[in-house]
Image: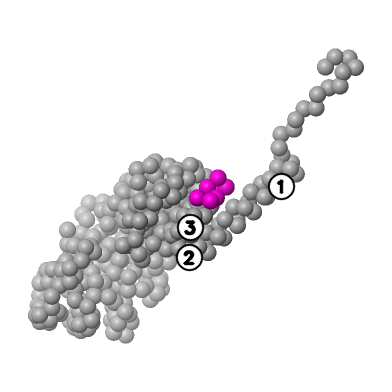
């Protein structure tokens, strides 16, 4: 400015108290959105809110919306395609891509869980989510249950990022003392389903279970762990020793006795236990087989076995020297038809 001329006032960048106020208002709005998402009672309510608030939502909101939709839809498989075809859901997926680089460890695991629960893994999510998994694995910011969720999710989505699974393996072994029964089951089931070699994971998880955690295992966890023991114990080079798998299976079988949890086992879970013993070449005690047979007969009386489950049971019992028809299932039982996957000896 020339002499005697007033100098122009330089604009100040937003910051200090004003910037803090702006951030606080935005955080308050996002917090309110999150609360409404958590309380939403149906798919349409969630999608209406994500559409209405699309420009306001932060990474927390996006992850919460995905998680809420997956939670609402996981027991309504017949309606899942309606969600996946909804343009509002497609817009939410675009928001996932846009916000993925901001996801913390929990949000990353939550979105992966959501995709797996919805059985939906579109190509546009692959790179941004896997890059975020890499980011948090490198910084070791995932908690033990996040690692187990990702193992389960990758297996459910039939996605096998080998290097990431190797990192999950190492980090899970390092924090094994913090694993819950569900964490143990999800970790091993995921690695077994993906046929991901691991020499350490099964014995480390078995040691964790034997420290007193085994008595807390639910039937679904026993079934998943038995499946994993059977697969990993017969995987050969790079996997655990067969004897380690057999010892874990013997311990798991004690949870399927009349005085423990046997009355709560489903027919499919019992089929898995029998199949696991046959695959590993382990003969259960006769009194255990007798108890399982009685439980199976009671379950089949209520609901016939799926065709694939029946075939798996017959083949497995044959290897164990047991007769299936007339003993484990009635001669007249007709297998129910279903698209549900059954345990396979493959």
- Tell me where residue 175 sits by quadrant: bottom left
Q: Earlier in the sequence, mark 2 or mark 3?
A: 2
| Relative horizontal placement of residue 122, taking residue 280 as reference (left or right) | right
Residue 10 in view of the camera: yes
Q: Position of residue 246 (x, y in %)?
A: 24, 67
Q: Which one is in front, 308 or 51?
A: 51
Quarter the N terminus occupies: top right
Local secondary structure at mark 2: loop
| Relative horizontal placement of residue 273, taking residue 220 as reference (left or right) | left
Mark 2 residue crowding within 10 angstroms, few (<14) / some (14–19) / many (20+) = few
Q: Position of residue 211 (x, y in %)?
A: 40, 70
Q: What's the magenta region?
A: 51-60
Q: Earlier in the sequence, mark 1 or mark 2?
A: 1
Give the residue displayed 18% in from the left and 62% down from the top.
Answer: 344
- Indicate which disc residue 46 carries: 3
The residue indicated by pointer 1 is 21
Q: Is residue 54 magenta?
A: yes
Q: Is residue 38 magenta?
A: no
The residue indicated by pointer 2 is 41
């Amino acid at each position: 400015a020339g002499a005697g001329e007033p100098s122009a006032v330089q604009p100040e960048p937003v910051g200090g108290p004003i910037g803090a106020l702006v951030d606080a208002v935005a955080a308050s709005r996002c917090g309110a959105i999150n609360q409404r998402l958590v309380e939403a009672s149906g798919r349409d309510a969630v999608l209406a809110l994500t559409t209405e608030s699309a420009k306001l939502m932060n990474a927390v909101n996006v992850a919460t919306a995905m998680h809420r939709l997956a939670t609402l839809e996981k027991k309504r498989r017949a309606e899942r395609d309606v969600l996946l075809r909804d343009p509002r859901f497609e817009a939410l997926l675009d928001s996932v891509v846009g916000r993925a680089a901001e996801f913390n460890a929990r949000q990353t695991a939550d979105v992966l869980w959501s995709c797996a629960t919805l059985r939906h893994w579109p190509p546009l999510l692959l790179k941004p989510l896997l890059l975020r998994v890499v980011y948090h694995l490198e910084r070791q910011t995932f908690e033990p249950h996040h690692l187990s969720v990702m193992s389960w999710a990758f297996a459910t989505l039939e996605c096998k990022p080998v290097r990431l699974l190797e990192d999950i393996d190492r980090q899970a072994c390092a924090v094994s003392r913090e694993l819950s029964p569900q964490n143990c089951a999800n970790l091993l089931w995921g690695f077994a389903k993906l046929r991901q070699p691991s020499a350490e994971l099964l014995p480390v998880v078995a040691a964790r279970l034997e420290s007193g955690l085994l008595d807390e295992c639910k039937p679904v966890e026993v079934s998943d762990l038995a499946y994993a023991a059977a697969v990993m114990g017969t995987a050969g080079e790079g996997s655990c020793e067969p004897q380690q798998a057999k010892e874990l299976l013997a311990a798991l079988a004690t949870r399927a006795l009349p005085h423990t949890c046997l009355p709560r086992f489903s027919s499919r879970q019992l089929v898995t236990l029998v199949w696991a013993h046959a695959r590993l070449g382990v003969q259960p005690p006769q009194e255990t087989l007798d108890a399982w047979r009685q439980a199976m007969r009671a379950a089949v009386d209520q609901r016939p076995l799926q065709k694939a489950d029946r075939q798996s049971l017959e083949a497995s019992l044959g290897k164990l020297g047991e007769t299936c028809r007339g003993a484990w299932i009635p001669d007249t039982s007709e297998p129910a038809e279903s698209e549900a996957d059954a345990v396979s000896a493959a």
